[in-house]
Amino acid sequence: MNRAVALAKEMGLDHRYIYQNYANQTQDVFAGLSPENKKRLLQIQKRHDPERVLSRLQPGAFRLQESADSTMKGRSSL
């Protein structure tokens, strides 16, 4: 995966947005969001799922986190 990203950057084809279905579990799929959109999604998450029940019950999904570097840490291995 790193080679593919490096080659895309070298060719000028790299883009910050990563489609979740094509992402590797080590990639931050939320890094492509603008800060405003990420903040909005976090607000929606806090309003509708304050206990994060839905996040815990969905195995294998990418997790929206406060900090960008913790996206993979929140990923479930159930």
Image: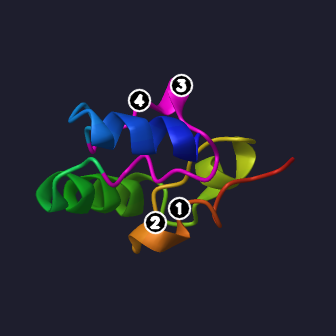
User: Depth check: 25 or 9 in front?
Assistant: 9
Kindly report the distance in space between the C-alpha atoms of the residues bearing marks 1 and 2: 6 Å
The residue type indicated by label 2 comes to Gln
Across the whole image, how many numbered discs are drawn on residues? 4
Label 1: how many residues lie within 10 Å, few (<14), some (14-19) or many (20+)? many
The part of the chain drawn in magenta is: 16-31
User: Depth check: 41 or 52 in front?
Assistant: 41
Label 4: how many residues lie within 10 Å, few (<14), some (14-19) or many (20+)? few
Q: Position of residue 10 (x, y in %)?
A: 30, 41
Mark closer to the chain start, 4 or 2: 4
**43 is higher (above) or lower (below) than 62:** below
Kindly report the distance in space between the C-alpha atoms of the residues bearing marks 4 and 2: 17 Å
- In the structure shown, which secondary structural element does the residue marked by tag 4 occupy? loop
Q: Are marks 3 and 4 in contact (CB under 8 Å)?
A: yes
Query: Which mark is on residue 65?
Result: 2
Q: Which residue is mark 1?
A: 71
Q: Is residue 29 magenta?
A: yes
Kindly report the distance in space between the C-alpha atoms of the residues bearing marks 3 and 4: 6 Å
Q: Are marks 1 and 2 in contact (CB under 8 Å)?
A: yes
Mark closer to the chain start, 2 or 3: 3
**3 is higher (above) or lower (below) than 39:** above
Q: Which residue is mark 3?
A: 21
Q: Are marks 4 and 1 in contact (CB under 8 Å)?
A: no
User: Residue at position x 59%, y 39% from top?
Assistant: 1
Mark closer to the chain start, 4 or 1: 4
User: Residue at position x 53%, y 61% from top?
Assistant: 71
In the displayed structure, does residue 63 sit left or right of residue 34?
right
Mark closer to the chain start, 1 or 2: 2
The residue type indicated by label 1 comes to Thr
Label 2: how many residues lie within 10 Å, few (<14), some (14-19) or many (20+)? some
The residue type indicated by label 3 comes to Asn
